[in-house]
């Protein structure tokens, strides 16, 4: 029976070393939940890097056995490979260019490119050990752009889907990459290519049309052998989980404590990974402007800002972290009183129960990335608002803004607009909050993670059928 192989850079599992043993804890992330319905069935499998360097062959064997129990298959990477393929190429070429930060953060090193090719080949070799004719392979994200073609060349008899979780930039950005054609050709090994939004699709098609000698017609690319379909599939979340969490007694207790602590204030929540694309410094500027323009809000409103540690050994990220520390310090130093701080800042991650309690109590969720493929935090806030109140302020640069049109939409570069949106949000009448929130909740419920997985897989099947009927014509 044909099987499905999911492939991503990271496996949906956290591996930690304690003494001499490796401990596995499955991830609760949205993608893992959504794809759980697939990879845990029959002979299906999820293939990826376990997220930690395991050099010893004996340890590799043990971890492989443990992962097998969870339907997971590891691709082990050396520290050099992690540095060059992951940090050097994925995060210092693709991430900045795809988020429109090419001039500030991109570094094009031939050695990193060569390692990126080598590791994509390593993933391919691991897949070829298990893939059979008729299998379906779903490859995820920007770390593996070359993989669809590598698999296709070795195994033309499988179905390949590719989904990119981050934006695809305008061709004017994309063409800056020295190896742009190889990247596009790599992706075109897939039968179906998915992005979060129609804009990403448009940018990708335009890059293919301009850079490769290939015919593009509407959203179909014909490379002479196969028709490759490119479409938007907006990723959703596990809405039920976020609606049920606030009902748990421990979450309720935590929410009550937060309410009590901030009882005479408006609470504004922001949650991001440490990243320049998330617009954290600009958000802080808007927060400072708020008190300059509205001194009556001093002691009446608090920003609860969680920044989840990420890549902070990399100089650019460390610098960003230092700048955030400095700015938060300045604002708190300038406006705080004995009992109140304008910003409660946390540089750490929290358990999902705490996030739920915060989503549930925050009057406003402030999501203002400079550029974001989708942004799941905005959807998690909506799904958590079981009483249909609260206001989402959302950047027009996040993919989610194309769906959550009843949010208060802002341009994150317009500091005054963001600051005004906060004032508008905390003064929004309950009836208007409820009307907007109800509409957004309908969207988040209908287009949830299960729906996303289903429509992608169904479409991949249809594309294969279309290709077959074109061949027999
Ligand atoms: C990439 C794209 C796209 C955050 N803090 C904690 C925590 N989180 C969870 C959130 C959310 C996830 O992390 C972050 O997801 P985002 O979508 O906001 O952002 P990226 O990590 O940049 O993800 C993005 C996504 O892929 C999916 O395609 O939407 O555009 O950049 O789920 O809840 N989770 C826990 N503790 C924390 O402190 N447990």
Image: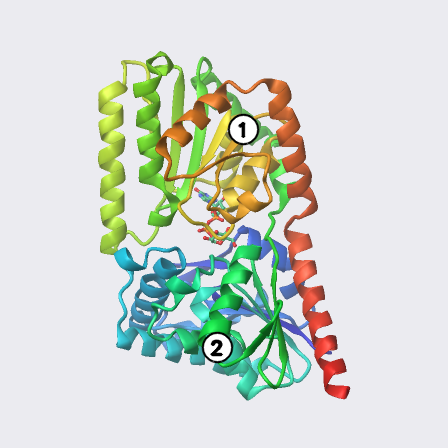
For the residues marked 2 and 1, what is the alpha-carbon distance in whole angstroms? 42 Å
Nearer to us in this view, 400 or 69: 400
Which numbered circle lies on residue 220? none
Q: Is residue 66 visible?
A: no
Question: At numbered mark 1, what does the secondary structure look like: helix, strand or loop?
Answer: strand
Residue bearing the label numbered 2: 186
Q: Is residue 140 above or below residue 326?
A: below
At a point 65% along the width and 85% down the height, the residue shown is 157
Residue 30 rendering spot, x and y as whole percentages: 56, 51
Q: Quadrant of residue 70?
A: bottom right
Residue 371 rendering spot, x and y as whole percentages: 42, 49
Q: Is residue 453 visible?
A: yes
Residue 434 rendering spot, x and y as whole percentages: 64, 25
Q: Residues within 10 Å of mark 2 (few under 14, many from 20)?
A: some
Q: Is residue 229 left or right of residue 324?
A: right
- Chain-order first, disc 2 or disc 1: 2
Q: Residues within 10 Å of mark 1 (few under 14, many from 20)?
A: many
Q: Is residue 107 left or right of residue 296?
A: left
At a point 53% along the width and 80% down the height, the residue shown is 214
Residue bearing the label numbered 1: 391
Q: Is residue 452 above or below residue 461?
A: above
Nearer to us in this view, 467 or 248: 467
- Looking at the rendered image, the quarter that the C terminus falls into is bottom right
At a point 42% along the width and 77% down the height, the residue shown is 181
- Looking at the rendered image, the quarter that the N terminus falls into is bottom right
Q: Is residue 409 above or below residue 214?
A: above
Residue 243 rendering spot, x and y as whole percentages: 64, 36
Please state the total of marks drawn on the protein image.
Answer: 2
Q: Is residue 104 left or right of residue 210?
A: left
At a point 50% along the width and 42% down the height, the residue shown is 377
């Amino acid at each position: 029976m044909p099987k499905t192989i999911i492939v991503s850079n990271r496996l949906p599992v956290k591996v930690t070393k304690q003494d001499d043993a490796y401990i596995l804890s499955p991830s609760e992330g949205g993608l893992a939940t959504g794809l759980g319905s697939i990879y845990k069935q029959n002979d299906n499998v999820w293939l990826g890097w376990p997220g930690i360097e395991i050099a010893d062959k004996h340890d590799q064997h043990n971890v492989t056995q443990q992962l097998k129990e969870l339907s997971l298959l590891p691709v082990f990477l050396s520290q050099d490979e992690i540095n060059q393929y992951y940090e050097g190429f994925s995060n210092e070429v693709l991430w900045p260019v795809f988020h429109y930060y090419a001039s500030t953060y991109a570094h094009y090193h031939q050695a990193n490119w060569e390692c990126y090719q080598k590791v994509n080949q390593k993933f391919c070799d691991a897949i070829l050990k298990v893939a059979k004719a008729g299998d379906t392979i779903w490859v995820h994200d920007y770390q593996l752009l070359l993989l669809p073609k590598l698999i296709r060349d070795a195994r033309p008899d499988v179905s390949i889907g590719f989904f990119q979780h981050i934006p695809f930039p305008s061709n004017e950005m994309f063409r800056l990459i020295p190896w742009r054609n190889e990247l596009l050709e790599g992706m075109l090994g897939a039968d179906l290519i998915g992005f979060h939004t129609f804009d990403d699709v448009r940018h990708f098609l335009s890059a293919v049309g301009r850079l490769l000698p290939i015919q593009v017609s509407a959203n179909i690319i014909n490379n002479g052998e196969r028709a490759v379909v490119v479409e938007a599939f907006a990723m959703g979340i596990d809405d039920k989980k976020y609606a049920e969490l606030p009902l748990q007694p421990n979450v309720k207790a935590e929410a009550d404590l937060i309410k009590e602590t901030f009882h005479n204030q408006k609470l504004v929540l922001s949650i991001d990974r440490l990243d320049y694309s998330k617009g954290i410094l600009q958000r802080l500027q808007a927060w400072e402007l708020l008190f300059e323009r509205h001194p009556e809000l001093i002691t009446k409103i608090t920003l609860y800002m969680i920044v989840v540690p990420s890549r902070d050994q990399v100089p650019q990220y460390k610098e960003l972290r230092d700048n955030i520390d400095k700015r938060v310090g300045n604002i708190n130093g300038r406006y705080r009183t004995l009992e109140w701080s304008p910003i409660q800042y946390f540089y750490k991650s929290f358990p999902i129960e705490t996030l739920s309690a915060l989503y549930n109590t925050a009057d406003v969720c402030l999501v203002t990335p400079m550029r974001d493929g989708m942004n799941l935090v905005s959807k998690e806030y909506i799904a958590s608002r079981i009483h249909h109140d609260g206001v989402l302020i959302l950047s027009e640069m996040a993919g989610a803004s194309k769906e959550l049109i009843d949010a208060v939409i802002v341009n994150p570069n317009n500091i005054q607009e963001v600051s005004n949106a906060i004032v508008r949000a905390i003064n929004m009448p309950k009836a208007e909050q409820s009307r907007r929130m109800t509409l957004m909740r309908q969207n988040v419920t209908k287009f949830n993670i299960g729906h996303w997985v289903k429509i992608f897989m169904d479409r991949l099947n249809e594309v294969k059928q279309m290709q077959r009927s074109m061949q027999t014509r």
